[in-house]
Image (cartoon, helix red, strand yellow):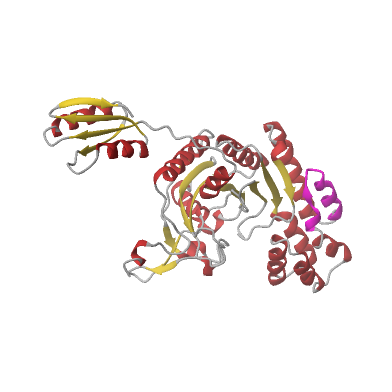
Amino acid sequence: MENRLLHTPEGVRDIYGDEMAQKLELERILDKKIKSFGYHRIETPSFEFFDIYSNEIGTTPSREIYKFFDSENNTLALRPDFTPGVVRSAVKYFMEDALPKRLCYLGNTFSNRSDLQGKLKEVTELGVEFLGDASVEADAEMIYMAVELLKSVGLSDFQICIGTEEYFRGICEAAGLDAGHQDALSEHIRNKNYFGAMDVIDDIRTSDGIRQALASFSDFVGGVEILDSAASLVSGISRSVCAIERLRMLYERLKIYGVESYISFDLGMISKRNYYTGVVFKAYTFGTGDAIIRGGRYDHLMEKFGKNGAAIGFTVVVDQVMNTLISQKIDITVEYKRALIVYDGTSFEKAVQLADKLRNDEFDTEILQLGSDVSPSLYIEHAKATHATKIYRIENGLEKEVQL
Protein backbone atom coordinates (compact mmCIF):
# COMPACT_ATOMS: atom_id res chain seq x y z
CA MET A 1 0.00 0.00 0.00
CA GLU A 2 2.86 2.35 0.81
CA ASN A 3 4.40 1.93 -2.66
CA ARG A 4 0.99 2.39 -4.29
CA LEU A 5 0.75 5.86 -2.78
CA LEU A 6 3.85 6.91 -4.71
CA HIS A 7 2.47 5.96 -8.11
CA THR A 8 0.02 7.68 -10.44
CA PRO A 9 -2.90 5.99 -12.23
CA GLU A 10 -2.36 4.77 -15.77
CA GLY A 11 -2.43 7.58 -18.31
CA VAL A 12 -1.22 10.45 -16.08
CA ARG A 13 2.22 11.48 -14.88
CA ASP A 14 4.25 13.99 -12.90
CA ILE A 15 6.21 16.71 -14.69
CA TYR A 16 9.04 18.47 -12.86
CA GLY A 17 12.55 19.92 -13.12
CA ASP A 18 13.96 20.85 -16.51
CA GLU A 19 11.04 19.27 -18.38
CA MET A 20 8.60 21.43 -16.44
CA ALA A 21 10.65 24.55 -17.16
CA GLN A 22 10.75 23.70 -20.87
CA LYS A 23 7.01 23.05 -20.95
CA LEU A 24 6.31 26.43 -19.34
CA GLU A 25 8.62 28.13 -21.84
CA LEU A 26 6.89 26.36 -24.73
CA GLU A 27 3.50 27.51 -23.44
CA ARG A 28 4.83 31.06 -23.08
CA ILE A 29 6.06 31.13 -26.70
CA LEU A 30 2.79 29.75 -28.06
CA ASP A 31 0.67 32.06 -25.90
CA LYS A 32 2.65 35.12 -26.99
CA LYS A 33 2.18 34.24 -30.67
CA ILE A 34 -1.57 33.69 -30.24
CA LYS A 35 -2.02 37.00 -28.45
CA SER A 36 -0.17 38.75 -31.28
CA PHE A 37 -3.23 37.94 -33.42
CA GLY A 38 -5.51 39.83 -31.02
CA TYR A 39 -6.88 36.88 -29.03
CA HIS A 40 -7.99 37.29 -25.40
CA ARG A 41 -7.49 34.65 -22.71
CA ILE A 42 -10.51 32.96 -21.18
CA GLU A 43 -10.52 30.37 -18.39
CA THR A 44 -13.39 27.91 -18.07
CA PRO A 45 -13.93 25.27 -15.35
CA SER A 46 -12.14 21.93 -15.41
CA PHE A 47 -15.52 20.29 -14.88
CA GLU A 48 -18.97 21.25 -16.16
CA PHE A 49 -22.47 19.83 -16.22
CA PHE A 50 -22.36 16.64 -18.26
CA ASP A 51 -25.03 17.98 -20.62
CA ILE A 52 -22.63 20.27 -22.49
CA TYR A 53 -20.74 17.18 -23.71
CA SER A 54 -23.87 15.17 -24.55
CA ASN A 55 -24.60 13.38 -27.82
CA GLU A 56 -26.88 16.26 -28.79
CA ILE A 57 -23.96 18.68 -28.59
CA GLY A 58 -21.86 16.22 -30.60
CA THR A 59 -18.60 16.41 -28.70
CA THR A 60 -17.21 13.27 -26.99
CA PRO A 61 -18.74 9.79 -26.56
CA SER A 62 -20.08 9.33 -23.03
CA ARG A 63 -17.92 6.26 -22.41
CA GLU A 64 -14.78 8.38 -22.91
CA ILE A 65 -15.73 11.01 -20.31
CA TYR A 66 -14.88 10.99 -16.60
CA LYS A 67 -18.26 11.48 -14.89
CA PHE A 68 -19.16 12.03 -11.24
CA PHE A 69 -21.91 13.48 -9.05
CA ASP A 70 -21.96 16.56 -6.85
CA SER A 71 -23.75 16.92 -3.51
CA GLU A 72 -26.97 17.93 -5.30
CA ASN A 73 -26.80 14.76 -7.43
CA ASN A 74 -26.03 16.67 -10.65
CA THR A 75 -24.00 14.69 -13.18
CA LEU A 76 -20.71 16.48 -13.81
CA ALA A 77 -17.91 15.75 -16.26
CA LEU A 78 -14.19 16.45 -16.34
CA ARG A 79 -13.48 18.50 -19.45
CA PRO A 80 -12.67 16.23 -22.44
CA ASP A 81 -12.78 19.11 -24.93
CA PHE A 82 -12.40 22.88 -24.48
CA THR A 83 -14.65 24.11 -27.26
CA PRO A 84 -18.13 23.50 -25.76
CA GLY A 85 -17.14 25.20 -22.49
CA VAL A 86 -15.65 28.21 -24.25
CA VAL A 87 -18.73 28.54 -26.47
CA ARG A 88 -21.04 28.23 -23.45
CA SER A 89 -19.11 30.97 -21.66
CA ALA A 90 -18.99 33.23 -24.72
CA VAL A 91 -22.75 32.96 -25.27
CA LYS A 92 -23.36 33.69 -21.58
CA TYR A 93 -21.16 36.79 -21.37
CA PHE A 94 -21.07 38.12 -24.94
CA MET A 95 -24.61 37.35 -26.10
CA GLU A 96 -25.30 40.88 -27.31
CA ASP A 97 -21.95 41.61 -28.97
CA ALA A 98 -22.29 42.31 -32.68
CA LEU A 99 -18.59 41.96 -33.54
CA PRO A 100 -16.68 38.65 -33.68
CA LYS A 101 -14.88 37.45 -30.54
CA ARG A 102 -11.35 36.07 -30.54
CA LEU A 103 -10.75 33.92 -27.45
CA CYS A 104 -7.86 31.68 -26.40
CA TYR A 105 -7.29 29.21 -23.57
CA LEU A 106 -4.69 27.04 -21.86
CA GLY A 107 -5.41 24.08 -19.60
CA ASN A 108 -5.81 20.33 -19.32
CA THR A 109 -8.31 17.95 -20.89
CA PHE A 110 -9.17 14.45 -19.68
CA SER A 111 -9.96 11.33 -21.71
CA ASN A 112 -11.32 8.15 -20.11
CA ARG A 113 -10.26 5.88 -22.95
CA SER A 114 -8.69 2.45 -22.66
CA ASP A 115 -7.28 2.31 -26.21
CA LEU A 116 -4.74 5.13 -25.97
CA GLN A 117 -1.78 2.72 -26.34
CA GLY A 118 0.62 4.59 -24.10
CA LYS A 119 -0.82 8.05 -24.74
CA LEU A 120 -1.78 10.26 -21.82
CA LYS A 121 -5.31 10.55 -20.48
CA GLU A 122 -4.59 14.04 -19.18
CA VAL A 123 -2.96 16.44 -21.63
CA THR A 124 -2.32 20.17 -21.81
CA GLU A 125 -4.00 22.02 -24.66
CA LEU A 126 -3.63 25.58 -25.84
CA GLY A 127 -6.08 26.83 -28.40
CA VAL A 128 -8.19 29.51 -30.00
CA GLU A 129 -11.83 30.08 -30.90
CA PHE A 130 -12.90 32.70 -33.46
CA LEU A 131 -16.61 33.24 -32.83
CA GLY A 132 -19.09 35.10 -35.03
CA ASP A 133 -17.30 35.04 -38.39
CA ALA A 134 -18.45 32.70 -41.18
CA SER A 135 -16.00 33.96 -43.81
CA VAL A 136 -13.33 32.04 -45.65
CA GLU A 137 -10.94 34.74 -44.44
CA ALA A 138 -11.55 33.50 -40.89
CA ASP A 139 -10.68 29.97 -42.03
CA ALA A 140 -7.46 31.30 -43.55
CA GLU A 141 -6.52 33.19 -40.39
CA MET A 142 -6.86 29.99 -38.36
CA ILE A 143 -4.62 27.96 -40.62
CA TYR A 144 -2.08 30.76 -41.04
CA MET A 145 -1.92 31.13 -37.26
CA ALA A 146 -1.37 27.37 -36.90
CA VAL A 147 1.58 27.62 -39.28
CA GLU A 148 3.02 30.57 -37.38
CA LEU A 149 2.66 28.80 -34.05
CA LEU A 150 4.64 25.79 -35.24
CA LYS A 151 7.32 27.98 -36.77
CA SER A 152 7.57 30.00 -33.54
CA VAL A 153 8.75 26.92 -31.58
CA GLY A 154 11.38 25.98 -34.16
CA LEU A 155 9.52 23.51 -36.37
CA SER A 156 9.99 23.89 -40.11
CA ASP A 157 9.16 20.51 -41.65
CA PHE A 158 5.41 20.06 -41.17
CA GLN A 159 2.15 19.97 -43.11
CA ILE A 160 -1.29 21.37 -42.45
CA CYS A 161 -3.73 18.87 -43.95
CA ILE A 162 -7.15 20.33 -44.80
CA GLY A 163 -10.46 18.62 -45.42
CA THR A 164 -14.13 19.53 -45.27
CA GLU A 165 -17.07 17.86 -43.58
CA GLU A 166 -19.46 19.29 -46.17
CA TYR A 167 -18.03 17.27 -49.08
CA PHE A 168 -18.79 14.00 -47.28
CA ARG A 169 -22.17 15.13 -45.96
CA GLY A 170 -23.26 16.32 -49.39
CA ILE A 171 -22.60 12.88 -50.90
CA CYS A 172 -24.32 11.13 -47.98
CA GLU A 173 -27.33 13.39 -48.42
CA ALA A 174 -27.50 12.63 -52.13
CA ALA A 175 -27.23 8.91 -51.38
CA GLY A 176 -30.06 9.12 -48.83
CA LEU A 177 -27.95 7.54 -46.08
CA ASP A 178 -29.56 7.12 -42.68
CA ALA A 179 -27.65 8.14 -39.54
CA GLY A 180 -26.44 4.59 -38.86
CA HIS A 181 -24.92 4.08 -42.29
CA GLN A 182 -23.42 7.57 -42.26
CA ASP A 183 -21.76 7.04 -38.86
CA ALA A 184 -20.39 3.65 -39.86
CA LEU A 185 -19.07 4.95 -43.18
CA SER A 186 -17.48 8.04 -41.61
CA GLU A 187 -15.66 5.88 -39.06
CA HIS A 188 -14.22 3.63 -41.77
CA ILE A 189 -13.17 6.59 -43.90
CA ARG A 190 -11.63 8.32 -40.87
CA ASN A 191 -9.65 5.16 -40.06
CA LYS A 192 -8.61 4.67 -43.71
CA ASN A 193 -10.38 1.29 -43.70
CA TYR A 194 -11.21 0.88 -47.38
CA PHE A 195 -12.65 -2.61 -47.04
CA GLY A 196 -14.88 -1.64 -44.13
CA ALA A 197 -16.15 1.34 -46.13
CA MET A 198 -16.92 -0.90 -49.10
CA ASP A 199 -18.93 -3.25 -46.88
CA VAL A 200 -21.14 -0.31 -45.90
CA ILE A 201 -21.38 1.01 -49.46
CA ASP A 202 -22.42 -2.41 -50.75
CA ASP A 203 -25.50 -2.20 -48.49
CA ILE A 204 -26.60 1.15 -49.95
CA ARG A 205 -29.10 1.48 -52.77
CA THR A 206 -28.01 4.44 -54.86
CA SER A 207 -26.68 5.36 -58.29
CA ASP A 208 -23.34 4.10 -59.57
CA GLY A 209 -22.03 7.69 -59.66
CA ILE A 210 -22.77 8.32 -56.00
CA ARG A 211 -21.47 4.87 -55.08
CA GLN A 212 -18.22 5.75 -56.86
CA ALA A 213 -18.03 9.06 -54.99
CA LEU A 214 -18.50 7.29 -51.65
CA ALA A 215 -15.78 4.79 -52.51
CA SER A 216 -13.23 7.38 -53.69
CA PHE A 217 -12.28 9.28 -50.53
CA SER A 218 -8.88 7.62 -50.30
CA ASP A 219 -8.09 8.93 -53.82
CA PHE A 220 -8.31 12.58 -52.87
CA VAL A 221 -5.18 13.21 -50.81
CA GLY A 222 -2.47 15.58 -51.98
CA GLY A 223 -2.00 19.05 -53.42
CA VAL A 224 -4.58 21.55 -54.58
CA GLU A 225 -4.91 19.69 -57.89
CA ILE A 226 -7.01 16.96 -56.25
CA LEU A 227 -9.86 19.45 -55.82
CA ASP A 228 -10.57 19.47 -59.57
CA SER A 229 -10.80 15.68 -59.68
CA ALA A 230 -13.08 15.60 -56.64
CA ALA A 231 -15.35 18.32 -58.03
CA SER A 232 -15.79 16.48 -61.34
CA LEU A 233 -16.90 13.35 -59.47
CA VAL A 234 -19.69 15.18 -57.60
CA SER A 235 -20.68 17.69 -60.30
CA GLY A 236 -24.37 17.00 -59.71
CA ILE A 237 -24.22 17.37 -55.90
CA SER A 238 -24.33 21.10 -55.19
CA ARG A 239 -23.49 20.79 -51.47
CA SER A 240 -20.29 18.91 -52.19
CA VAL A 241 -19.39 21.19 -55.12
CA CYS A 242 -19.78 24.24 -52.85
CA ALA A 243 -17.51 22.58 -50.31
CA ILE A 244 -14.80 22.14 -52.92
CA GLU A 245 -15.20 25.73 -54.08
CA ARG A 246 -14.76 26.88 -50.48
CA LEU A 247 -11.48 24.97 -50.26
CA ARG A 248 -10.30 26.62 -53.50
CA MET A 249 -11.10 30.05 -52.06
CA LEU A 250 -9.31 29.12 -48.85
CA TYR A 251 -6.21 28.07 -50.78
CA GLU A 252 -6.13 31.42 -52.59
CA ARG A 253 -6.25 33.24 -49.21
CA LEU A 254 -3.45 31.05 -47.89
CA LYS A 255 -1.34 31.96 -50.94
CA ILE A 256 -1.77 35.62 -49.93
CA TYR A 257 -0.41 34.68 -46.50
CA GLY A 258 2.46 32.91 -48.24
CA VAL A 259 2.01 29.55 -46.50
CA GLU A 260 0.80 27.40 -49.40
CA SER A 261 3.96 25.25 -49.22
CA TYR A 262 2.74 23.92 -45.85
CA ILE A 263 -0.72 22.99 -47.18
CA SER A 264 -2.12 19.68 -48.43
CA PHE A 265 -5.67 18.36 -48.77
CA ASP A 266 -7.43 15.18 -47.63
CA LEU A 267 -11.13 14.87 -48.45
CA GLY A 268 -11.29 11.75 -46.30
CA MET A 269 -10.54 13.82 -43.18
CA ILE A 270 -13.75 13.49 -41.16
CA SER A 271 -13.80 14.41 -37.48
CA LYS A 272 -15.29 12.14 -34.83
CA ARG A 273 -16.65 15.30 -33.19
CA ASN A 274 -20.01 15.79 -34.80
CA TYR A 275 -20.23 19.53 -34.20
CA TYR A 276 -17.80 20.27 -37.04
CA THR A 277 -19.66 21.59 -40.08
CA GLY A 278 -17.15 22.77 -42.70
CA VAL A 279 -13.39 23.00 -43.08
CA VAL A 280 -11.36 20.76 -40.78
CA PHE A 281 -7.59 20.60 -40.50
CA LYS A 282 -4.73 18.87 -38.70
CA ALA A 283 -1.00 19.55 -38.45
CA TYR A 284 1.49 16.70 -38.80
CA THR A 285 5.25 16.50 -38.49
CA PHE A 286 8.00 13.95 -37.82
CA GLY A 287 8.51 12.45 -34.38
CA THR A 288 4.89 11.84 -33.44
CA GLY A 289 2.28 9.49 -34.78
CA ASP A 290 -0.59 11.83 -34.10
CA ALA A 291 -1.65 15.34 -35.07
CA ILE A 292 -0.14 18.16 -33.00
CA ILE A 293 -2.87 20.64 -34.01
CA ARG A 294 -6.55 19.86 -34.65
CA GLY A 295 -9.24 22.29 -35.67
CA GLY A 296 -12.23 23.11 -37.78
CA ARG A 297 -15.39 25.10 -38.35
CA TYR A 298 -18.46 24.55 -36.18
CA ASP A 299 -21.19 26.88 -37.39
CA HIS A 300 -24.09 25.39 -35.40
CA LEU A 301 -22.57 24.72 -31.97
CA MET A 302 -23.47 28.15 -30.61
CA GLU A 303 -27.13 27.42 -31.41
CA LYS A 304 -27.08 24.66 -28.78
CA PHE A 305 -26.44 27.37 -26.18
CA GLY A 306 -29.05 29.82 -27.44
CA LYS A 307 -27.30 32.05 -29.99
CA ASN A 308 -26.94 31.74 -33.74
CA GLY A 309 -23.41 32.26 -34.93
CA ALA A 310 -20.61 30.76 -36.99
CA ALA A 311 -17.29 29.80 -35.41
CA ILE A 312 -13.95 28.16 -36.09
CA GLY A 313 -11.07 27.18 -33.84
CA PHE A 314 -8.20 24.81 -33.15
CA THR A 315 -6.22 23.33 -30.32
CA VAL A 316 -2.50 22.68 -29.91
CA VAL A 317 -1.64 19.53 -27.96
CA VAL A 318 1.28 20.90 -25.95
CA ASP A 319 2.51 17.48 -24.80
CA GLN A 320 2.65 16.26 -28.41
CA VAL A 321 4.61 19.34 -29.45
CA MET A 322 7.07 18.74 -26.58
CA ASN A 323 7.63 15.14 -27.72
CA THR A 324 8.05 16.29 -31.32
CA LEU A 325 10.68 18.88 -30.43
CA ILE A 326 12.62 16.30 -28.42
CA SER A 327 12.40 13.78 -31.27
CA GLN A 328 13.60 16.36 -33.81
CA LYS A 329 16.36 17.52 -31.42
CA ILE A 330 15.02 21.08 -31.34
CA ASP A 331 15.97 22.76 -28.08
CA ILE A 332 13.56 24.77 -26.02
CA THR A 333 15.88 27.39 -24.58
CA VAL A 334 14.99 28.40 -21.05
CA GLU A 335 16.72 31.55 -19.80
CA TYR A 336 17.46 31.10 -16.12
CA LYS A 337 18.20 33.97 -13.76
CA ARG A 338 18.58 32.27 -10.42
CA ALA A 339 20.65 32.76 -7.30
CA LEU A 340 21.42 30.63 -4.25
CA ILE A 341 22.37 32.04 -0.83
CA VAL A 342 23.79 29.78 1.89
CA TYR A 343 24.28 31.25 5.36
CA ASP A 344 25.30 30.26 8.86
CA GLY A 345 23.19 30.58 11.99
CA THR A 346 24.40 34.11 12.75
CA SER A 347 23.71 35.57 9.28
CA PHE A 348 19.98 35.12 8.72
CA GLU A 349 19.24 38.87 8.61
CA LYS A 350 22.06 39.45 6.14
CA ALA A 351 20.79 36.58 3.95
CA VAL A 352 17.26 38.00 3.91
CA GLN A 353 18.54 41.45 2.93
CA LEU A 354 20.65 40.05 0.10
CA ALA A 355 17.77 37.85 -1.12
CA ASP A 356 15.44 40.87 -1.26
CA LYS A 357 18.03 42.81 -3.26
CA LEU A 358 18.51 39.95 -5.75
CA ARG A 359 14.77 39.44 -6.14
CA ASN A 360 14.35 43.14 -6.85
CA ASP A 361 16.99 42.63 -9.56
CA GLU A 362 14.73 39.85 -10.94
CA PHE A 363 16.80 36.90 -9.74
CA ASP A 364 14.78 33.90 -8.54
CA THR A 365 16.54 33.48 -5.21
CA GLU A 366 16.67 30.51 -2.87
CA ILE A 367 18.20 30.68 0.64
CA LEU A 368 19.54 27.70 2.58
CA GLN A 369 21.05 27.53 6.05
CA LEU A 370 24.44 25.86 6.22
CA GLY A 371 24.21 22.44 7.83
CA SER A 372 27.04 21.18 10.00
CA ASP A 373 26.83 17.73 8.43
CA VAL A 374 26.48 18.89 4.80
CA SER A 375 29.50 19.09 2.52
CA PRO A 376 30.06 22.55 0.94
CA SER A 377 30.34 20.84 -2.44
CA LEU A 378 26.73 19.69 -2.13
CA TYR A 379 25.56 23.31 -2.27
CA ILE A 380 27.57 23.83 -5.45
CA GLU A 381 26.00 20.72 -6.99
CA HIS A 382 22.54 21.95 -5.96
CA ALA A 383 23.17 25.36 -7.53
CA LYS A 384 24.22 23.76 -10.80
CA ALA A 385 21.28 21.33 -10.79
CA THR A 386 18.80 24.19 -10.31
CA HIS A 387 20.53 26.41 -12.93
CA ALA A 388 21.59 29.07 -10.42
CA THR A 389 23.85 31.62 -12.12
CA LYS A 390 25.04 33.12 -8.82
CA ILE A 391 25.80 31.59 -5.42
CA TYR A 392 26.60 33.52 -2.23
CA ARG A 393 27.98 32.25 1.07
CA ILE A 394 27.42 34.32 4.22
CA GLU A 395 29.27 33.44 7.42
CA ASN A 396 29.56 35.63 10.53
CA GLY A 397 27.79 38.38 8.60
CA LEU A 398 30.42 38.42 5.84
CA GLU A 399 29.14 37.95 2.30
CA LYS A 400 31.18 36.21 -0.42
CA GLU A 401 30.18 35.29 -3.97
CA VAL A 402 31.28 31.75 -4.82
CA GLN A 403 32.46 30.84 -8.29
CA LEU A 404 30.43 28.06 -9.89
Residue 205 falls inside the magenta stretch: no
Which residue: 84% across, 46% down? 228
Image quarter for residue 402? top left
- Residue 163 appears anywhere in the view: yes
Observer-nearest of 260 and 384: 384
Observer-nearest of 223 and 387: 387
Provide the residue span drawn in magenta. Answer: 217-234
- Residue 97 appears anywhere in the view: no
Q: Quadrant of the N terminus?
A: bottom left
Image quarter for residue 268? bottom right
Tell me: residue 8, above or below residue 298. below
Q: Position of residue 204 (x, y in %)?
A: 80, 72
Q: Quadrant of the C terminus?
A: top left
51 vs 393, left or right, is right
Tell me: residue 118, above or below residue 259. below
Observer-nearest of 390 and 61: 390
Observer-nearest of 215 and 193: 193
94 vs 270, left or right, is left
Q: Position of residue 82 (x, y in %)?
A: 50, 53
Which residue: 50% across, 43% down? 103
Tell me: residue 172, above or below residue 165. below
Q: Position of residue 64 (x, y in %)?
A: 52, 66
Which residue in the rendered view is the most extreme toward the bottom? Answer: 203
Residue 227 falls inside the magenta stretch: yes
Image quarter for residue 274? bottom right
Q: Position of residue 364 (x, y in %)?
A: 31, 34
Which residue in the rendered view is the most extreme toward the left? Answer: 346
- Please identify the dominant SS of the magenta region: helix
